[in-house]
């Protein structure tokens, strides 16, 4: 056997080596993409919150949540109060049984 010629590897082994290389590159790309998305999400400005919320009826606020053009407050009087984000006016009151 000549020392200048490398032994020929089987086609299956060549295919598996290429497949592992492609899958490794795909996984590295996916991890980099996930890290980039997390960094972009944490660097986004926080949502605007109202300075104060006047809860009618003297009820105490228990929790707060918000949507794109509204925010809601749940009270200890078993109500959900939905306010307009722009005007701060009460839009809807939902009684909880």
Image: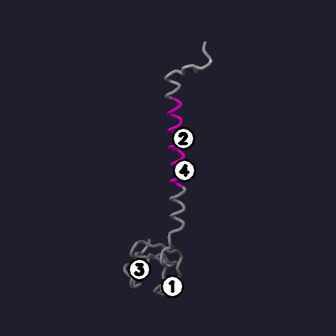
Name the residue carrying label 3. Answer: 85
Q: Is residue 77 above or below residue 5?
A: below
Question: Residue 28: image x %, image y %?
Answer: 54, 46
User: Image height check: is 2 above or below 92?
Assistant: above
> Separation of disc 4 and disc 1 at Cα?
39 Å
Q: Nearer the viewer, residue 69 or 75?
A: 69
Q: Disc 4 marks which residue?
A: 31
Left or right for 80, reference 61: left
Q: Which residue is mark 1?
A: 51
Q: Which image quadrant for residue 6?
A: top right
Q: Left of 95 or right of it: where is 33?
A: right
Q: Which residue is mark 2?
A: 24
Q: Residue at x 37, y 80 (%)?
A: 91
Judge left or right: residue 21 versus residue 88. Answer: right
Residue at 50 percent across and 72 percent down: it is 45
Residue 83, x across and y down, in percent: 41, 80
For marks 1 and 3 on the same chain, the one whose residue lies earlier in the sequence: 1
């Amino acid at each position: 056997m000549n020392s200048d010629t490398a032994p020929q590897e089987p086609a299956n082994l060549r295919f598996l080596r290429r497949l592992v290389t492609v899958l490794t590159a795909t996984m590295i790309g996916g991890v980099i993409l996930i890290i980039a998305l997390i960094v972009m999400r944490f660097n986004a400005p926080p949502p605007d919150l109202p300075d104060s919320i006047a809860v009618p009826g003297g009820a105490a606020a228990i929790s707060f949540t918000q949507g794109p053009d509204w925010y809601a407050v749940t009270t200890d009087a078993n109500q959900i109060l939905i306010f307009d984000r722009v005007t701060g006016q009460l839009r809807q009151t939902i009684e909880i049984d």
